[in-house]
Amino acid sequence: MGPATLLFRRHQRQGRRVLTDPAVGWVAAYIGIGSNLSNPVVQVKYALRELARLPESCLTACSALYRTLPVGPQDQPDFVNAAVSLNTRLGALDLLAALQDVEDVHGRLRNGTRWGPRTLDLDMLLYGDVVIDSPELRVPHPELARRAFVLAPLADIAPFDLCIPGQGLLTDLLAACSGDGIWRQGSPAGCEGLASLAES
């Protein structure tokens, strides 16, 4: 099946624009995780626990951790990056709102600084095979094809033949990216027991 067209209606809920779609069934979503402040490994570990607790969602896989050089200004610490997959019944913008809530708990500052240091960054990389281009959200993530620090963790957990809508096969995109500035660090503690994350 080719990329779907996302039809949605927006409404206001608690001051946020969210997507409601009563026909939404289970969707496989991929989330990129990054941190380079306040003990990044711990930030990622706790983010995994919080993602496992999202409503109407199930955390199904998490990648190894990767240490990566920052994009943009180099006068900041290296990042720790990872990716997870979720099966979710949340609409795309509901999921986005939930991810932003997790970021806020971790002290994420939204001051307009691009490529700056951050305690936690959660990016929706893919939402099924849906293409979304709205003011609130763009999926697939527009920079995905050019970022080895996103593609490498994603390749850890995605099907071998995963096709990124509008961009191509994940394996081809990763092969075309330079591996400079990215180092695999191993699995985060506790990721092997996914079922226990939601209960811990």
Image: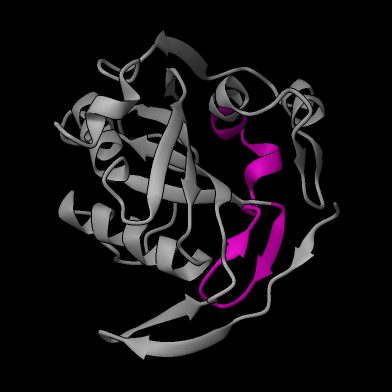
Position of residue 108 measured from the top left corner of the image (x, y, whole percent): 24, 54
Name the one closer to the observer, 7 or 71.
7
Quarter the C terminus occupies:
top left
What colouring method underlies this structural image? Answer: one colour
19 up-or-down from 15: above or below = above
Highlighted range, magenta: 129-151
Locate residue 191: give its quadrant: top left
The spot of residue 72 in percent (x, y) is 49, 43
Up/down of 48 relative to 88, above or below: above
Count of all numbered marks drawn on residues in the image: 0
- Residue at the spot x=61%, y=64% of the render? 138
Closer to the camera in the image, 56 or 156: 56
Q: Residue furthest bottom?
A: 11
* Camera-nearest residue between 139 and 121: 139
Residue sitting at x 44%, y 20%:
66
Tell me which corner region of the image, top left, top right, bottom left or bottom right, holds residue 169: top right
Quarter where residue 144 is shown: top right
Above or below 65: residue 21: below
Q: Is residue 174 left or right of residue 62?
A: right
